[in-house]
Amino acid sequence: MQIKHPEVYSIIESIGLHYRNNIANRYTRPVLALLPLDNSHWAQIEELTEKTTHYRYQGYHLDELYPMIIAMGKFILLARKQGLQLFKQSSSLADTRLSSQDKIFRDMALSNFSANLNVLADAVNKLYVKTVELDKEQAGHKPPVLSRYPELAELGRYLIE
């Protein structure tokens, strides 16, 4: 089943923009790459945050979208649990070659990281709720696609823990 709903596109575009600008920016990306996520999860996060124009034309298949949502949920969980520790331990963030302005931007990115993760978690939850709504509408009397993904039951925990 494909989803071609303007609200889904809008939510995904806002997730991508927020992720690129506030979560995985040039100051935090090298450290976030150290999070213990499978390569498949990183690929799904990239699909969700970077390749929106590709999906704008073909729509999102629910069998692709649900794993992207799960991967982003796992990322948020790991970033909350381990990200700040990794930032403190990382020598790449203490780069002496940074200009004073870059150091200010780096410090801002780090000090707002938790709040920005909360914003991302809210947007992912909004995407999940809308996707489930559309999935159930399209399914009719058949089981919705989400029933094939038991890990979605853990999504709430991923997003708030």
Image (spheres, grey):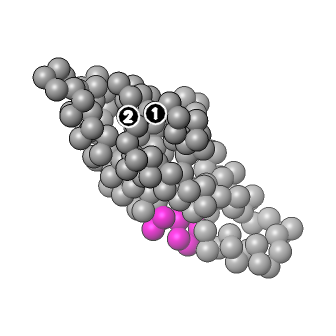
| Magenta span contains residue 10 | no
Picture layout, residue 122 above or below residue 38: below
Magenta residues?
110-116
Q: Is residue 45 left or right of residue 76?
A: right
- The image position of residue 45, as x and y in percent, is 53, 40
Residue type at tag 1: Gly
Tell me the crowding category of disc 2: few under 14, some 14 to 19, or many 20 or more residues within 10 angstroms, Cα based. some
Which residue bears the numbered disc 1?
A: 59
Q: In this view, does 111 lie to the left or right of 6?
A: right
In this view, which residue lies farthest toward the left?
Answer: 141
- The image position of residue 124, as x and y in percent, is 39, 50
Q: In this view, does 120 lie to the left or right of 91?
A: left
Residue at 31%, 40% (x, y): give it: 131
What SS does tag 2 mark?
Answer: strand
Residue at 36%, 57% (x, y): give it: 122
Which residue bears the numbered disc 2?
A: 3
The quarter of the rendered structure image containing the N terminus is top left
Residue at 40%, 47% (x, y): give it: 6
In this view, which residue lies farthest toward the top?
Answer: 142
Whether residue 112 appears in this view of the structure is yes
Picture layout, residue 2 above or below residue 34: above
